[in-house]
Image (spheres, helix red, strand yellow):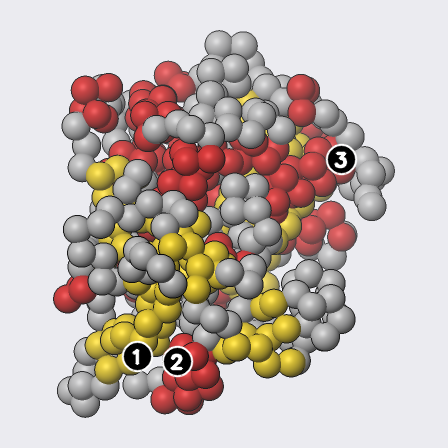
Amino acid sequence: MEAPRHWRLKKQRYSLTGEVCPHCSAKIFPPRDVCPECGQEAKTAFQFSGKGEVFSYTTINDAPSGYQEQAPYAVALVKLNEGPIVTAQLTDLGAEPVRIGMPVEMVTRRIKDDGNERGVILYGYKFRPVIAGPR
Amino acid sequence: MNTNQEKKQVVIAGIGMLPVGEHWDLSLRTLGARAVRKALADSGNLKPDAIYIGNGLANILSHQANLGALISDEAGFSGIESCTFEAAGASGAAAFRAACLAVQSGLIDVAVALGVEKITDCDGSTALTAQDLILNYEFEGITGLTVAAGAAIIAQRYISEHLLDHSIFQNIALQSYQHAQDNPNAMYRNGLTAAMYQKQSIKNDPLGLFDISSLADGAAALVVTREELIPVESREEMVRVLGSANAIAPLSLHDRHQLLQYSAASQSAASALRKAGMSLNEVDLFELWDANSIDTVLSMEAIGLALPGKGWQTENIILNSMGGCLGRGNPLGASGAYQLAEAVLQLRGQAGACQIAQLPKRALVQALGGLGSTAITHILGHG
Ligand SMILES: [Zn+2]
């Protein structure tokens, strides 16, 4: 179990907390010390809406250990409405085929079984299709 | 920026390769030491001052770090300088660049660059999981992404943006498998037909079995020294290192400004050509990265060999003449060293049945690590 790492990342994984650059207003996820847009220091927390669209995707049949129970599953690059792209699994797809441009929203789900005797389960963000209709 | 004013010419005095495949009977140290000894024998038994080792996965798959001491001692060179360089798929190329810099500096006279990877000490799924270390663990690996899936995500976007379909990858695979047929060190020597390709299982949509290289055991080494240390009568035939450059780009796919532009590949190729004082049209032979066929497509475009959307059209250049990672097999941290050694064989006219018809004068060899996040380019040639 990698407790310190999971503790450190929990705001990012549970609530998609990133940063906004105080110098150029770029939205940043995941947070980092140097703004990738202007190269200056970035430290101001920013809460993303969790809405976006599929930028690209694939399906994983041969899953790595810790993920085999979930296979097959789709992993996507999701372009958030605020600009940044995040890597995430897609979930709750039902019969709907994944397509580039599909609107999606963040949900919190089980990410991984730690696979050890203590049975620790890791939670974090996945994205699901936005239900069609008025929003 | 450096121009072509490096007085001390680096020459490749020897090469050695083991067949790529499943070496159940050989350990990591034996594979590595044998390639080193083969390369030194090819150099006329030069005595190395340093051995630089490119390796990606020994820490996991062989439970082994500190390869410098392990392998160099095994090869019979206790007392010399040795350590490891890691840059995912570009590890072998990183070790070679280190060897070139060392001899060019004048502080080292003879250096060996070894790429070595021992994949088959564990089962296949362990090897693939280890390979996923080259992704950003906290924000990519944690989602269940794999390296092949990352390549597929890039390929999916490529096909969509350029209104193409997955058949564009067929020629790259067919060509690599065809070239590998004549390479005695290649893993896949039975060829591949269009019918077989079209019936392949799709592993990660849109990439199939033959679009993704297979990890395997391998070791390849090159001996470098300065031209001034070589007897005058032997200098003419030596392959020289004319340019060398390493560039990186964001590791995570989601951090890249343009997913379909391999900026590191572009920058390192341009920089290596500039150091060689050459333009792209003076290159006769290309060894480009093909751990996944989309890597080759985007490398073609990044280097300037094809326009965006056309990088799958490789007919106009001589590419991966000994099979590349797809046909030769991909011993990850060693593949960069194989690419270089294969280019040396072509430039020497010693590539056997793989020899290209008109003896090439200059080769551009580029290894990528981690889906284009690291790119190391070398220009080799005869002056
Ligand atoms: Zn900024």
The subunit letter for the residue under badge 1 reads A
Q: Which of B198 and B153 is in front in this view?
A: B153
Above or below: residue B128 compared with residue B161: below
Q: Quadrant of residue B196?
A: top left
Q: Contact (CB < 8 A) between labels 2 and 1?
A: yes
Q: In which quarter of the image is residue A75?
A: bottom left
Q: Which amino acid does label 2 sit on?
A: Tyr
Taking the image as shown, residue B210 lies to the left or right of residue B343, namely left
Residue at the spot of label 3 = B274
The answer to whether the residue bearing label 3 lies less than 8 angstroms from the nearest atom of ligand 1 is no
The tag earlier along the polypeptide, 2 or 1, is 2
Above or below: residue B61 compared with residue B172: below
Between circles 3 and 2, the one closer to the viewer is: 2
Residue at the spot of label 1 = A123
Residue at the spot of label 2 = A14
The subunit letter for the residue under badge 2 reads A
The subunit letter for the residue under badge 3 reads B
Q: Position of residue B306 (x, y in %)?
A: 57, 25
Q: Position of residue A38 (x, y in %)?
A: 73, 63
Measure the alpha-carbon separation of dots 3 and 2: 48 Å
Helix, strand or loop status at disc 2 = helix
